[in-house]
Amino acid sequence: MKPERFDVVVAGVGAMGSAAVDHLARRGRKVLGLERFDVPNEMGSSHGYTRIIRLAYYEHSSYVPLLRRAYELWRGLEADAGERLLHVTGSVDAGPEDSFVFAGSLRSCLDHGLEHEIVDSQELGRRYPGYRLPAETLALIQPEGGFLLPERCIVAHVQRAQAHGAEVRARERVLEWEPTVAGGVRIRSDRSEYEAERLVLTPGAWASGLAGLDPNLVVAERQVLAWLQPRRPELFAPERFPVFNLAVEEGRYYGFPIFTIPGFKFGRYNHLGERVDPDEVDREPRPTDEEILREFAERYFPDGAGPTIALKVCLFENSPDDHFLLDLHPEHPQVVLAIGFSGHGFKFASVIGEVVADLATQGSTAHDIGFLGLERLAGGTTPV
């Protein structure tokens, strides 16, 4: 049998892949999305009921224009889906004045004229009594932060893509690909073979093997999230509890109000620093995981540190410098890479889909993504 032919094949239909399939289909491309698990699923990085979105961006000020476009695209997806996908609570980025979180967040606000307010820990606790942060803490409050519903966002992207003619096939694993003489790509899965003009790789924590690049380019890391029953649940309702990123002596943490699961949700970035094989990761939370997270909640959010409601394991897909890898393949420009999102990518999925569609159809994009290209790693540099 001859391989089925498509304009574009997208390998991985999670956050980024679902958005890519959607944008490509709406541009009239014949597109196929292949997902090795379910759509959506809990095997990678795009589940857990809520994901933070925020405009103040301490990781790098250059992300802010992408975020502004992401907000526009999420609102458009909401309108087409007929459901609310983005909930605004405000965001808090807090830590000592010279901390990466607070100082970087402030820099992004000043660079881009973002509305914000700076308060000390006492004032933060007065406004939002669920917070009990150290006296030396400064907090930047940005009113447009909030959270997205990851599973529903993926479904909305897939359904809109399907309405525009896209095919999405789950439980089909891409095994390998190779360039063709004609300048396209031949893709082999565990079910079939395909040919396409372009291939988009959005496989999350499985990127290193599939991209055919340095295995250290994207490293899977085991991450654990906790939901604890608040002792005073009214303090952790969405209207009284902004999403947060927090730098304290124990590390860097992030958290959410109560939503869907009746618990205060939070996690520690780079939880235990466990580099893992994504096919063999221990997906069962351990007592040590719970102890680490509970100690944090009891110290800084004591009214939220009641009985455990849920614990979940997910995966980070870390790049060497924790910035995204968004570029054409260095050896095969008919292959688009959208990988290495390093635990802070979901909020960008709507605009990443647009960027990927640009790269797959035009070879370039008007979005400023130069700071996310592969060349920075070849030169040993990190965005500054």
Image: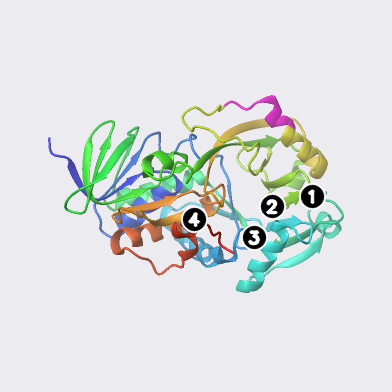
Q: Where residue 113 sits in the image (x, y, percent)? A: 63, 74
Disc 4 vs disc 3: Cβ atoms closer than 8 Å?
Answer: no
Observer able to see residue 85: no
- CA gap, disc 4 and disc 3: 21 Å
Question: Mark 1 or mark 4, which has the lower sequence index?
Answer: 1
Q: Residue at x 82, y 41 (%)?
A: 299
Q: Mark 3 or mark 1: which is in front?
A: 3
Residue at which label 2 appears: 244
Q: Mark 1 or mark 4: which is in front?
A: 4
Left or right placement of residue 176 versus residue 309 in this view: left
Observer able to see residue 74: yes
Residue 225 is a magenta residue: no
- CA gap, disc 2 and disc 3: 12 Å
Q: Mark 2 or mark 3: which is in front?
A: 3
Question: Mark 4 or mark 3, which has the lower sequence index?
Answer: 3
Q: Where residue 264 sits in the image (x, y, percent)? A: 70, 41
Disc 1 vs disc 2: Cβ atoms closer than 8 Å?
Answer: yes
Q: Mark 4 or mark 3: which is in front?
A: 4
Q: Where residue 97 sits in the image (x, y, percent)? A: 78, 61
| Colour scheme of the rendered structure | rainbow
Q: What residue type is labelled 3?
A: Tyr
Q: What element carries label 3?
A: loop
Q: Quadrant of residue 308?
A: top right
Image disc number at residue 377: 4
For the N terminus, the image quarter is: top left
Q: Nearer the viewer, residue 165 or 203?
A: 203
Residue at which label 1 appears: 131
Q: Which residue is drawn at 28% across and 42% down?
A: 177
**Magenta stretch bounds:** 284-291
- CA gap, disc 1 and disc 2: 10 Å
Residue at which label 3 appears: 58
